[in-house]
Amino acid sequence: MKNRKLHVGVFGTWRGRAHIRAIGILDEAEVTAICDKDPERIEQVRYLCPPDVKICRDYDELLDSGIDVVVLCNYFTDHAACAIRALRAGIAVVSECLAAVTMRECVELVETVEQTGLYYSMAENTPYKGSVLEMQRLYRSGVLGEVIYAEGEYCHPSSPENAGQYTPSANHWRQFLPATYYLSHSIGPLMNITGLMPKRVIGKVAASAAYARRRGRQNGDAAGIMLVEMEGGALFRVSGCAFYGPESHWFRLACEKGGVENVRTHEDTVSLAVNPWDIPEKLGAFGSKSTYEPLPDAILRRASERGIVIRGHMDADIRTVYNYVRELTEGRAPDMDVYRSAAISAVGILGWRSVLNGSCQYDIPDFRDPYEREQFRSDDLSPWRGEIPYYLYQVE
């Protein structure tokens, strides 16, 4: 790969379109193969690819097309199985979130990465918003001290008609999606900012039959909240609410010496406050309180120089792609490696299980420890696995 561009295959071109567009402005990589079951979607993205891009009929053909890495943008419930197949075929993996939907899949995915030694990363894009990266820089500089409490909120309003496009059939996976599973956009940024891993989770959902009827859903989870205890004792409150507004991608850290958050009305603006008695010299001209926008970074300057504008998720999409391409081409360890990806998935899985069992607390295993993950090796409970879906509120 050092003497040529990274060859990328994209599986699923609806969400995959964002990856294809972003890769198109990079010198280090190119999309050489794509696969989607819908021919119309293939045609809609073909112009974004090189003229000789290979159109694959199925996943097997994609894996056999000479790619170095596959980007998984297929159905959420199949990510882990497809990742494992690619890794065993000697192909690196970038997976859209979540990484897995059962604890057994988490264990198998972790062990496959360990056995193959190949690159694996979950493409959680929200940590790459400009404001979140600035919060990470501030936190890791030490000016705020250790985090005590944090909040992560992701609300993406959508009309019933628009939501119907995401749930096109009675058996579609979104029909049975618990709110707790839609959390990577909420907890992922907090984990990247602080570097902490989750240890315990408690879940609660707001149930609404009206919500399910209006959106044609079997599952009536209108919103979900989880309290997540992190290593070191910090408490994170994260939401799993996708479709109710106002729109918000909001994150807040309350720390020993102050706090920082992105401003809801302008999500790439950062608001920083340090206790007046704790202001360190390194804070410089900012003083004890400051609200500002982070400066454009290298990839945004490159895109601007080429006259290209990619605004997906407030530039988080292009930064996500740029980051994993650099990790692959430079041999760097992934920010969102398989252990962090499995841990985020486990928060959603066990958060849902907490809801089913009266909001009791569940311990999240350290997937780096073979002993801790062993108890989940055969644990295949999920809303989708088995003959009868596990959902909380069925609309009669």
Image (tube, rainbow, N blue to C red):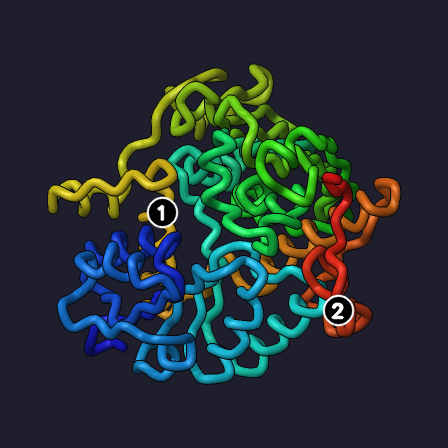
Q: Is residue 232 above or below residue 322?
A: above
Earlier-in-chain disc, 2 versus 1: 1
* Amino acid identity at mark 2: Arg
The disc label shown at residue 100, or none: none
Number of numbered discs visible in the structure rendering: 2
The spot of residue 4 in percent (x, y) is 20, 76
Looking at the image, which residue is at 42% across and 75% down?
59
Name the secondary structure under disc 2: helix
Residue positioned 74% across, 66% down in the render = 386
Tell me the distance, in whole angstroms, between the alpha carbons under discs 2 and 1: 32 Å
Q: Nearer the viewer, residue 326 or 212?
A: 212
State the image quarter where residue 253 is shown: top right
Q: Which percent across, then down, holds residue 2?
A: 25, 76
Q: Position of residue 308 (x, y in %)?
A: 16, 44
**Could you tell me which secondary element the residue under label 1 belongs to?**
helix
Image position, residue 53 (x, y; %): 21, 71
Where residue 317 is drawn, which disc sits there?
1
Q: Which mark is residue 373?
A: 2
* Quadrant where the N terminus is found in the figure: bottom left
Q: Circle 2: is it few (<14), some (14-19), or many (20+) Cα within 10 Å? A: many
- With respect to residue 185, does 353 lie above or below? below
